[in-house]
Image (tube, rainbow, N blue to C red):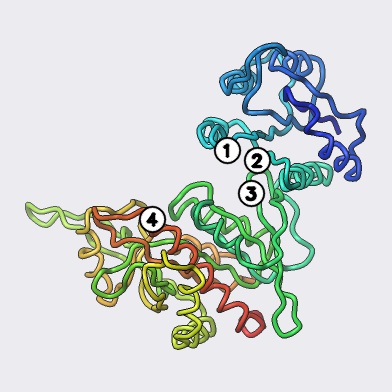
Amino acid sequence: MKILIADDQAKRYARLIASLATAGVGRENIDIAASSSAARECLGRTQYDLLILDILLPLWPEGEPTAQNSLDLLVELHEGDDHYPPGHIVGITADSSVAEGAAAQFADGTWTIVQYSESNDEWVNRIVNCVRYLLNEGRQVGGRVSENRIDLAVICALEQPELEEVLRLPWCWGSARPLDDVTFVHDGSFVVDGRTITVSATFSPRMGMVSTALRSAALISLLRPRLIAMCGICAGVKEKVRIGDVLFVDPAWDFQSGKRVRDKANSIFSMSPHQLHPPAIIRTHAEQIRADHVALAKISTVFGSDAPGQTRLFIGPVASGSAVLADGEVINEIKVQHRELIGVEMEVYGMYAAAYGASQPQPRPFAVKGVCDFADPDKDGSAQRYAAYASANVLRLLMERFGPRLLD
């Protein structure tokens, strides 16, 4: 296996190179280029399996590093024919502000982007996981199916704050690893009544039902989870719930499903909602969590003074749609489809559909989402963090209290 590191600060890769040696990649198979021009020379004469590309790279060794130099190199590798394109490209940066600014442009041209740190080895572990995936022939079509089923797969619509809050749970999370050529997961575990419960968590590349359904299908196919859950944020129905409450979704449906027909001079939308429910056993145990006001109150207490109020758990209908709602009016239209509606979001129906459409053994799906707004113009972005936190911690309550029962 051949690796090219394109970075003007070669010394910071000593830890990575040592770790790669333990993974089976010797120093003689690793080249380092200190500028984008030097990287072009290497790529012009050698076929690399992996390129580790600094987001800030000088054109020449004595020059000033800029994101544009790295972006230009990426474009050439994808659109030109003067170089051997590497099998995979991992972006790396030590400047989080630059990473956020360039991430959108790098996303289409790189496999993933890692954050360099002097204080921890998270970035080293993540790159080594990528290398191990490649060494294990992870590029084969369909990826590798796990030999052992995992217990719980968790999918979020957003990396921040949703997945971030899930990864704050004390579940022994590891560094992200590639599951296939597009999906990265964090593996973790926790113990309940002497039983170790395994878990993997990831986020969808885009919001919406289609992206969520595709990512859920990949998790189901490759990890074969016994349970699949969704955490995150949603909009609530104002007169029924409040900011910071958590909704257990039962049922979910696509509120935009149907057809538009013409009746004389009028065009009318004829609704055709197809409702999907979580298994009764999961709902039953969610009802027990709902009644435990002390445990739910602790979620708010631990968060601190910024909590919007004491979290409550509601169980009921939550509709999914493909558009972000912010006008405060559409929720009233959705209520026509289910008078007990308590929330609206964009993904859960896609995850439920993927679970119930999977081949045997099918995972048991469920979703818990925290209310961060009421789908009106008065949205407050600051509530998203707490809603994601509350959602993740209700998942923790459910799994750490009843996990073995839900799995058996």
Left or right relative to 384: residue 332: left
Q: Quadrant of residue 369?
A: bottom left
**Marks 3 and 4: which is nearer the front?**
4
Q: In the image shown, does 399 or 56 lie closer to the viewer?
A: 56
State the residue position of label 3. Answer: 183
The circle drawn on residue 382 is: 4
- Near-viewer residue (342 or 338): 342
The image shows residue 374 at horizontal and vertical percentages of 29, 62
Alpha carbon distance from label 1 to label 3? 22 Å
> Mark 1 = which residue?
96
- Circle 3: residue type: Thr
Tag 3's secondary structure?
Answer: loop
Residue 43 quadrant: top right
Q: Is residue 325 visible?
A: yes
Q: CA distance from mark 1 to mark 4?
A: 21 Å
Select label 3 or label 2 by which is in front. 2
Is there a contact, CB below 8 Å, between mark 2 and mark 4?
no
Q: Residue at x 24, y 53 (%)?
A: 377
Q: Are marks 1 and 2 in contact (CB under 8 Å)?
A: yes
Discs 1, 4 touching: Cβ within 8 Å: no
Image quadrant containing the N terminus: top right
Q: Are marks 3 and 2 in contact (CB under 8 Å)?
A: no
Rendered location of residue 234, percent (x, y): 38, 62
Instruction: Please tell me how crowded label 2 is: few (under 14), some (14-19), or many (20+) other residues with Cα within 10 Å.
Output: some
The three-letter amino acid code for the residue at tag 2 is Gln
Q: Which mark is residue 115?
A: 2
CA gap between label 2 and label 4 equals 25 Å
